[in-house]
Image (tube, grey):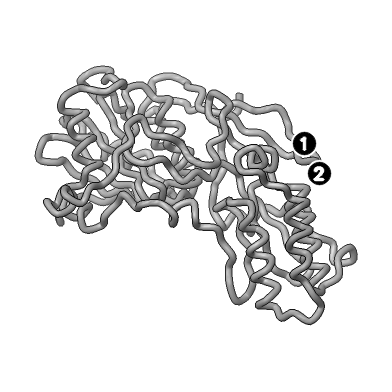
Amino acid sequence: MRKFFYALLPLLSLLVTVSCVDEEEFVDDPRGNFEALWKIIDERYCFFDYKAEAYGLDWNEVRARYSQQVNDGMSSDQLFEVLGNMLGELRDGHVNLYSPFDAARYWSWREDYPANFSDSLLRRYLGTDYKIVSGLQYRKLDDNIGYVYCPSFESGIGEGNLDEVLFYLAPCNGLIIDVRGNGGGQLTTAEKLAARFTDEDILVGYISHKTGPGHADFSSPEEQIIKPSAGIRWHKRAVVLTNRGVFSAANEFVKYMKCCPGVTVVGDKTGGGAGMPFSSELPNGWAVRFSACPMYDRDMQCTEFGIEPDYSVSLTTDDFLKGEDTIIEYARRLINTGSGSAEGRGSDV
């Protein structure tokens, strides 16, 4: 079994190219670029069957509908709008069209939902004397609970840094890991952090790869395994905080943590983003990024549209006016009372 190493970064689109369009096959005009884009997605996108079932996506119907909006006299701006709107039919935050003047994106996966996060409240909990290392912000709360805020996985986290963080928080009764608003980054970073919460190899999910142009042409699912870190591991209660802003590699992190003993997930459903993104190019040079490899949880369920928390909790106006974060306070009560479905595994780190 191979350990799963990939990075969910826009930068990946510059490194990996999937079947770039041959300009001899598609002419560089509005119609040629439209047909090129439709075909790239038709042959390489990985969630057609899933989204047909979820909300009735019909890619052939999409082509017929948007084709009527394309004409030889349209400007680049007009073409970009049509192509961007067509890609929006996929409802996928990993799908983007890049031109020299704009980037088409689908952000409804988080913009259509409550934020369930407040930066001003976060600062009340962190204060001004919190510690910072490898993008992590952490401190001991006044009830002796460790709190780690992880806003992104875009940068790597050093193993030595994680040892220092966990050693500092070792006297705490439990640990809160707040990934709300974490839009993703490197899967290896998510793996590295999750590896601190298990003492044995754990199956966390599966990944498949596109093997042909058909919508159902995929390889057999390969296991995703998280191996325990050789460094300090956490053995007490841990609670992961989520909201709709948790996407891509952060969505995977939540998937991993739900498989770790002693871990509970609290907050809102995550934003999803369970497709490994790759890229291609249109005849006019515009780049398109799209989901090409589907990832699943350990029950072979797709998490493209998000992961449900163990406890669904939202910020309330009353708590906000009191200067309290409802989701953080719920996690603190779980740890302090020992309630909930996930039980701690000991008293040491």
* Looking at the image, residue 269 lies above or below residue 235: below
Left or right position of 175 against 203: left
Vertical comparison of 59 with 105: above or below: above
**Which residue is tagged 2?**
213
Q: Is residue 192 left or right of residue 41?
A: left
Q: Residue at x 26, y 40 (%)?
A: 165
Towards the viewer: 58 or 72: 58
Residue 55 position within the rendered picture, expressed as x and y whole percent measured from the top left: 61, 43
Kind of residue indicated by mark 1 = Asp
Nearest the eye: 81 or 213: 81
Residue 168 visible in the current orientation: no
Picture coordinates of residue 307 (x, y %)? 45, 36
For the residue marked with disc 2, what is the amino acid?
Pro
Left or right of residue 158: residue 305: right
Label 1: which secondary element: loop
| Element on which disc 2 rests | loop
Find residue 207 and report its horizontal and vertical position in percent: 62, 33
- Circle 1 residue: 217
Dot 2 and dot 1 residues touching (CB under 8 Å): yes
14 sits left or right of 139 in the view = right
At 44% from the left edge and 40% from the top edge, which residue is drawn?
190
Question: Which quadrant holds the N terminus?
Answer: top right
Q: Residue at x 64, y 70 (%)?
A: 81
The residue closer to the viewer here, 69 or 13, is: 69
**Residue 88 seen in this snapshot:** yes
Residue at image coords 64%, 48%:
291
User: Crowding at label 2, few (<14), some or many (≥20) Cα neighbours within 10 Å?
Assistant: some
Name which quarter of the figure residue 348 lies in: top left
In the image, residue 73 above or below residue 65: below
Q: What's the distance in space between the residues labelled 2 and 1, CA to CA?
A: 7 Å
